[in-house]
Structure formats: structure tokens, C-alpha cells
Image: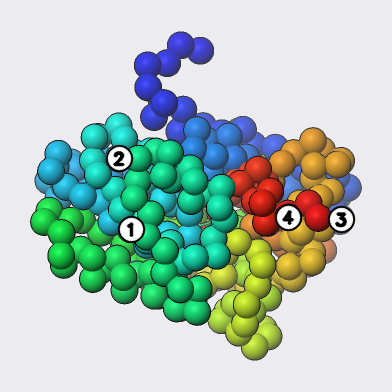
């Protein structure tokens, strides 16, 4: 395959039928988003957000992009900003992985850390405040921007259906941080398979989980507010996964399948298996594995 820019490598990732025994002889199909060039699903988002803002005339060659991010969106935005030659400032709560923050800087972005206690809302407030002080600043704001779910509704959902070549989809089981991936994929798949169950995955401690809200180690998912993108979606139920279950699958995936995946992917696998138990025999469940374990090695993901 001859290509002429790294941007051409974004999307069209493989769909893996998980090589495990699934309850009730059902099937779990997982989109391997760690194979995007920036190493995560968020390359799709960075490319879509900046290309659409550019085509609408909201940004130009003089714009500085400022975004609050847990890391992967920052890498995706920095990658897309490289292609357009734009300056980028990323606001990241302190504790998010060293590897992700290093990669953002390698792509030429400036990284500003905010205190962990303030969460993503603290990072968002800091990004908005910075934007007031910098000329030609643009904050895509993945938490509110409708182009976030649209990025997946127009790429990832249709790709999954094309990969499955007409196989009926019975459930969409996808982790939610901003909720963009879940909402976009759910919307596109539900339009074709209206009986598909729509099930977001949350770590224990999320405000959507059944237990009291609190901290969790699973990185990238867990909402701090009800995502606006969920409005109008016929969500069936929320599947809550413990950190232990998520990290357990991270280790098994490497040992048994030869696949390096991050903790939100571990949660997605655990949730898909739990959903398989609740659905009829022979169901087809689709999920997404957002990134690789390699960007969490310093956090001891395999310890
Ligand atoms: N997993 C990882 C590793 C992520 O970085 C993110 C984005 N925060 C998600 C899952 C959730 O994606 P979304 O924001 O689209 O809900």
C-alpha cells in the first residue's frame, strides 16, 4: 500500500471476532482502533473536528487549537493539526499517562496540566480561560461538539456494518468518556438494525454506574456528566465494569490472543461478555477497542 500522508492511515481498522468462547454461542466483534497511526480511535475525531471546522471557515492557518483532553483526543488533534500546520495547546489533568503526554509533545503540541482533583471539568475551564487570552484561538470542545458523535456516525459505524457484510447486529456495547463514540456508532447502527440493544460501558464509580460515584483506574471512560449526545438515543441499559475485570482482560488479551489493549478495551470485552449472557443464543455483539496498552506501561498496566 503506497500512501502519501499519515492522515491516509486513519480509519478502516480491522474488525476482530474475539477468539474466545462467548456465552450462548454468540459472537463478539471488536474494532481494533489501536491500529490508527496515533494509536487510538481519537485520530478519527481529531481529523474530523479540524477538517469540518476548516471547511466551515471556523479555523484557518492562523488558528491556535486549544482542547481539554485525557490524552488520546490530544494526540488525534495534534496529528490533524500537523497536517494543517496549526499550533496546538492541550490541557490535560496531571495523572493521565506519561506516554500520552509525551506523544502529544512529540507532535509539537504544548501540554498544560491541571490538578487531578478538578477532573475533566477543571481542564475544560482552563482551556476556555486560555482561549480568552490567545488571539485566533479555537476550542473544538469534544464534550459538547456535535461533530464528535458525527465523526463516528459517518466512519466507524458504517465500517463495522460493511466489515460484517450484512450480518445482523443485536447489540452495540461501547465505552463512553465523552460519549461520542458510543452515540455516533449507536445512531448509525440503530438506523439499520432498529432492534439492536444500545449499551454504554462505564467503570465502577461513574455517575451512570449503579454504585456511588468515585475514582477508577480504567482510563478514558467514565462520564462526569450525562453526555448531551445521549439525548434521544434509545439506550437499553448501562453495563458497569470493575477495574479488576477490565485489567484482567487486558492481561488475558496479551497472553491468549497476542493483542495489546488499554483498560477501556478490557472493560469493553468484559461488558460484551456480560451482555452476551443476557441476550438470546447466537447474538452478534459489536464493540470497540479504543487504544493499546503500550501507552500505559509506565502506569504498570501489566503489573
Ligand atoms: N477509551 C479511551 C482509551 C479513550 O481515550 C476514550 C476517550 N476519552 C474513550 C475510551 C471514550 O471515547 P468517547 O470519548 O468517544 O466516549
Residues at marks 2 and 3, CA–CA distance in whole angstroms: 46 Å
Q: Is residue 80 left or right of residue 160?
A: left
- Numbered badge on residue 67: 1
**The residue tagged with tag 2: helix, strand or loop?**
helix
CA neighbours of label 3 inside 10 A, class few (<14), some (14 to 19), many (20+): some
Tag in front: 3 or 1? 1
What residue is drawn where x is 73% and y is 54%? 301
For disc 3, the marked residue is 24
Q: Is residue 302 left or right of residue 53?
A: right
First of labels 1, 2 by sequence position: 1
First of labels 3, 1 by sequence position: 3
What residue is drawn where x is 21% and y is 50%? 64
Residues at marks 4 and 2, CA–CA distance in whole angstroms: 31 Å
* Residue nearest the viewer, comparing 119 with 151: 119
As drawn, 207 above or below 274: below
For disc 4, the marked residue is 300
**Contact (Cβ within 8 Å) of mark 3 with mark 4:** no
Tag in front: 4 or 2? 4
First of labels 3, 4 by sequence position: 3
Q: Ligand 1: does it lie within 8 Å of the C-beta at label 1?
A: no
Q: Quadrant of the C terminus?
A: bottom right
Residues at marks 4 and 1, CA–CA distance in whole angstroms: 27 Å
As drawn, 61 above or below 240: above
- Numbered badge on residue 161: none
First of labels 2, 3 by sequence position: 3
For disc 2, the marked residue is 81
Query: In which quadrant of the rendered view does residue 237 lie?
Result: bottom right
First of labels 4, 2 by sequence position: 2
Amino acid at each position: 500500500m503506497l500512501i502519501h500522508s499519515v492522515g491516509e492511515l486513519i480509519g478502516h481498522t480491522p474488525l476482530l471476532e474475539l477468539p474466545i468462547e462467548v456465552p450462548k454461542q454468540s459472537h463478539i466483534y471488536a474494532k481494533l482502533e489501536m491500529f490508527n497511526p496515533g494509536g487510538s480511535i481519537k485520530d478519527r475525531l481529531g481529523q474530523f473536528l479540524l477538517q469540518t471546522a476548516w471547511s466551515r471557515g471556523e479555523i484557518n492557518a492562523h488558528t491556535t487549537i486549544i482542547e481539554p483532553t485525557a490524552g488520546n483526543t490530544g494526540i488525534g488533534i495534534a496529528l490533524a493539526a500537523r497536517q494543517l500546520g496549526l499550533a496546538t495547546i492541550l490541557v490535560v489533568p496531571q495523572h493521565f499517562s506519561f506516554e500520552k503526554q509525551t506523544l502529544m509533545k512529540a507532535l509539537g503540541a504544548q501540554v498544560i496540566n491541571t490538578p487531578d482533583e478538578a477532573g475533566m471539568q477543571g481542564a475544560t475551564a482552563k482551556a476556555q480561560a486560555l482561549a480568552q487570552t490567545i488571539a485566533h484561538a479555537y476550542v473544538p470542545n469534544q464534550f459538547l461538539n456535535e461533530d464528535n458523535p458525527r465523526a463516528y456516525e459517518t466512519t466507524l459505524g458504517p465500517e463495522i456494518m460493511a466489515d460484517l457484510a450484512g450480518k445482523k447486529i443485536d447489540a452495540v456495547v461501547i465505552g463512553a468518556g465523552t460519549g461520542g463514540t458510543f452515540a455516533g456508532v449507536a445512531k448509525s447502527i440503530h438506523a439499520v438494525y432498529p432492534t439492536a440493544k444500545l449499551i454504554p460501558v462505564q467503570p465502577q464509580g461513574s455517575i451512570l454506574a449503579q454504585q456511588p460515584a468515585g475514582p477508577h483506574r480504567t482510563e478514558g471512560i467514565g462520564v462526569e456528566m450525562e453526555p448531551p449526545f445521549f439525548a434521544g438515543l434509545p439506550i437499553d441499559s448501562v453495563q458497569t465494569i470493575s477495574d479488576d475485570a477490565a485489567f484482567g482482560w487486558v492481561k488475558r488479551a496479551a497472553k491468549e490472543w497476542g493483542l495489546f489493549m488499554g483498560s477501556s478495551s478490557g472493560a469493553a470485552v468484559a461488558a460484551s461478555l456480560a451482555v452476551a449472557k443476557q441476550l438470546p443464543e447466537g447474538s452478534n455483539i459489536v464493540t470497540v477497542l479504543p487504544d493499546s496498552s503500550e501507552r500505559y506501561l509506565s502506569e504498570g498496566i501489566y503489573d
